[in-house]
Image (cartoon, rainbow, N blue to C red):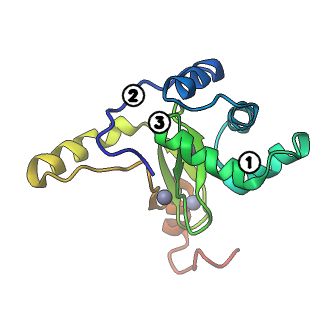
Amino acid sequence: MSVPGRPAQQAPADIDEVMELVRHEGGRASTARRVILEALVAAGGHRTAEELAADIHSGHPEIHQTTVYRNLERFEDLGVAYHTHLGHGPAQWHLTGSRHQHLVCQYCGAVIEADPDILAGLETTLHDRSGFELDLRHFAITGTCQSCASEAREHPISDPSVPA
Ligand SMILES: [Zn+2]
Ligand SMILES: [Zn+2]
Ligand SMILES: [Zn+2]
């Protein structure tokens, strides 16, 4: 859940800045919050809320899964983290600082991170023509990766869902 109308903000660079933002927005900069942020940073990429809770639980058994879930949502409201859906599974969490568009191959499941500026033209055109504002970050764009595409060209009758 994001706050409607909140302007795109500069992502905080480190945990101290994020904690400062949390305090500034009236949140309590609790140990649990810092630990969750550290886990997000340590994960370095995509992590489900459940995986993060498990990461945290090993070092901090006092931090419960519900605390992790609740704080992830709070971070999203504050614009410091966001969730994205790469496929049918649970949402993946990110720090806002790692800004990229997710491309997912529907054959091999590869996740490719693309520069979101590539889609700026589409965003502008759509907005100009229909007033629709794209939120491409929330869901991945699906397609066929380069290697699956060339595989399909070389073996046109093979079903890519069946492993060779
Ligand atoms: Zn990502
Ligand atoms: Zn969602
Ligand atoms: Zn592929």
Residue 95 spot, x, y in % from top left:
57, 36
Q: Are marks 1 and 2 in contact (CB under 8 Å)?
A: no
158 versus 45 height, above or below: below
The quarter holding residue 121 reads top left
Q: Which residue is mark 1?
A: 52
Q: Is mark 2 within 8 Å of ligand 1?
A: no
Q: Are marks 3 and 2 in contact (CB under 8 Å)?
A: yes
Expressed as whole percent of the image width and height from the top left, the position of residue 82 reads 52, 44
Where is residue 150? Give x, y as percent: 51, 60
The answer to whether residue 151 is seen in the rendering is yes
- Residue type at tag 3: Gly
Instruction: State how far apart marks 1 and 3 are (Cα).
Output: 18 Å
How crowded pointer 2 is (Cα within 10 Å; few <14, some 14-19, many 20+) is rated as few
Circle 1: residue type = Leu
Q: Could you tell me which residue is drawn at 65 percent across and 28 percent down?
A: 29
121 lies left or right of 111:
left
- What residue is rendered at 62% in x and 31% in y? 28
Structural crowding at the residue carrying mark 1, measured as other residues with C-alpha within 10 Å and reported as few (<14), some (14–19) or many (≥20): many
Looking at marks 3 and 2 on the same chain, the residue that comes earlier in the sequence is marked by 2
The Cα atoms of the two marked residues, 1 and 2, are separated by 25 Å
Which residue has dot 2 on it? 9
User: Who comes first in sequence, dot 1 or dot 3?
Assistant: 1
Mark 1 or mark 2: which comes first in sequence?
A: 2
Q: Secondary structure at mark 3?
A: loop
- Amino acid type at circle 2 is Gln
- In the picture of the structure, the residue carrying the numbered disc 3 is 79
Q: Nearer the viewer, residue 154 or 57?
A: 57
Q: Residue at x 68, y 38 (%)?
A: 40
Q: Please, what secondary structure does the residue beneath circle 2 have?
A: loop
Is 139 or 74 nearer to us in this picture? 74
| Disc 1, SS | helix
